[in-house]
Amino acid sequence: MASFNRVILMGNMTRDPELRTTEAGMAITKFGLAMSRSFKSQNGESHEETTFVDVDSFGRQAEVIAKFFSKGKPILVEGRLRLDQWESPSGERRNRLVVVLENFQFVGTRGEEAAVQENAPLEARASSSFNPLSAAREKLGGDRELKVPAPSQDLDDDIPF
């Protein structure tokens, strides 16, 4: 029988990401995510239901999340569910579902330049020669080229009416 284990969630971080590194050098970041849902009951009363989920991320994604996210920031995560099981010190069996992150996306209203500018060193922000795209290239490893598409000049030809 086939199975499918995929989760897509968007919410706000409930705590600052906790970055740890294994003895082998693998980065692991754990964080909490809260998602709220508003609805009306049968009698018309408004209600809000909040769900809290723990998320584990690994490798380069874990490092990026630890660097650019903090409590309260929105994030979209895609991953799979994993059941953690253990025995408490008092001998009780415990378990919980955790989302193992496979992909994520920044969510928010700020553009790339504003996000890079905010995370740049204070000296760079004060400099009139600070270039946010150059700073982003440095953060991505220096050699990678960021491609920013040029605006199309013939936009009227793309409108179907």
Image (cartoon, rainbow, N blue to C red):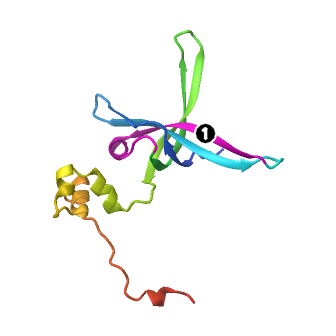
| Image spot of residue 49 (x, y percent) | 66, 41
Disc 1 secondary structure class = strand
Q: Quadrant of the C terminus?
A: bottom right
Residue in front for this viewpoint, 108 or 105: 108
User: Does the magenta-highlighted stretch encompass residue 47?
Assistant: yes
Image position of 51 (left or right of 55): right
Count every numbered label the image shows and give the total: 1
Q: Mark 1 points at which residue?
A: 51
Q: Which residue lies furthest to the right in this view?
A: 43
Sort mark 1 into few (<14), some (14-19) or many (20+) by Cα contacts within 10 Å.
Answer: few
The span shown in magenta is 45-72
Image vertical order of residue 56 relative to residue 40, above or below: above
Q: Does residue 77 appear left or right of residue 150 in this picture?
A: right
Looking at numbered disc 1 in the image, what kind of residue is underneath it?
Thr
On screen, 27 above or below 149?
above
Residue 100 image offset from top left, x and y in percent: 48, 40
Q: Which residue: 59% across, 17% down?
A: 93
Residue at 51%, 40% in the rendered image: 33
- Image location (x, y in percent) of residue 75: 47, 49
Split into 4 quadrants, where in the image is the N terminus?
top right
**Picture residue at 42% right of the left edge, 54% below the top:** 106
Q: Does the magenta stretch include residue 94?
A: no
Q: Residue furthest top?
A: 90
- Asked whether, in this view, residue 78 is left or right of residue 60, the answer is right
Where residue 68 sits in the image (x, y, percent)? 35, 47
47 relative position to 144: left or right: right
Residue at (44% x, 86% y) in the render: 155
